[in-house]
Amino acid sequence: MAAYSLMALSNTSSTSFSYDGYTIDLTVETINDNGVTRIAKATPGQGSGSSTTGGKTTKSPGHSGTGGSDADLQTLVNNMRAQDEDKPQKGDIEMNWGNKVSGTTDESTSPLFTKVNENLFNRPVYSKLIDVYNANVFTPEVCTAESEISGTKKELLDAVTKEFVNTTVFKLAFDYLVKTGKVSGTIDDWYPTLFQLWFGTYSRCHGALGSSGWEHVFSGEWKGSEIDGQHDWTRYYLIEKAGNINYHGYDSHDSNLIGTFQYTWEKYLKKIGGFFTDTSPSFDFSILTVCALAHSGGSACRFNLDGYPIYITSYTQSCTGGTCLSTAYPSDTS
């Protein structure tokens, strides 16, 4: 109460501070009642369990946004967040957002990830994902045709997808898709269609079948001199740890939940891109699937997560096997 009173009396509408490893955000709205300043609304918000250095949180939780896509979607997201047993916990991740980026110059001297508790990676949703990354089953260049999905490659992709599908967060997502009439039957019945959505190949290069939704979203691709896609924090962290990413700085971020920023991966530039930074890969896979099938389009899938408005852009396209995911990514701005 004392903090809110000081904010109101000093005309400070929002502030952030760190406490016990958390970023705490406070917002206050005041009214003038016959010359007396009164607090109309006071809102505390908790950032991620990760700790943050460098930069400033772009927004405070609960700030006015454009509203969610629908009430059922918001309920789904709330339940998924609560049931995400594999998300990073307090102290698992430390990040340094550095300086705000300008142009294409490197504005930050430190990597984005200061610390990651790699015990997280013993969890199957991470370990099976990392197995795919370590096996190098995808070719980053979009103009190079991908190998057939068979043998060991098929086994690895099935293993990680089925691990995601067996999580509580995905089962919640599937129930939502059934309720909204986007899918029918059981998860097992629908699995081949889901696999096709994520792994069906197509061309981003007017010829070679060198891309898929999964490769674009999770692994990341190289197109010309730029990075295309790459919206998985685990993948980014592993490449950065190996010394192959140079973090330039942020465009925006909401605590350690989500951010957009600039970096180079080897000689390729990601001018502006980003991802969730305090979720599990199964959460990302599940919510991006929901958005692609139920709320596709530019910033069309909207909801609040930990008090922050989130906007997911997603598109699908026709491909040889049916419908494939073109892209899906979250942003903290519409």
Image: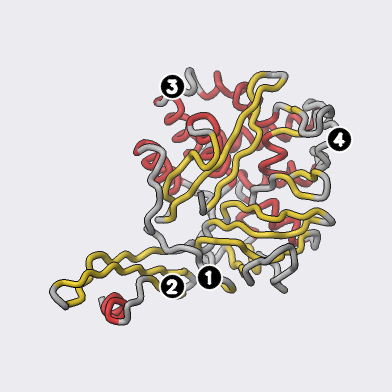
- Mark nearest the camera among 1 and 3 is 1
What label sits on residue 315 in the rendered view?
none
Whether 251 is drawn above or below 12: the answer is above
Tell me: 145 left or right of 275: right
**Which residue carries the number 1 mark?**
56
Which tag, 2 or 3, sits closer to the chain's start?
A: 2
Amino acid type at circle 1 is Lys
Disc 3: CA contacts within 10 A as few (<14), some (14-19) or many (>=20): few
Amino acid type at circle 2 is Ser
1 and 2 marks in contact (CB < 8 Å)? yes
Nearest the viewer among 330 and 279 is 330
Q: Residue at coordinates 35% horizontally, 76% vertically from top-left?
A: 12
Nearest the viewer among 183 and 70 is 70
Q: Residue at coordinates 42% horizontally, 69% vertically from top-left?
A: 24
What SS does tag 3 mark? Answer: loop
Amino acid type at circle 3 is Gly
**Which residue carries the number 3 mark?**
181
What label sits on residue 144 in the rendered view?
4
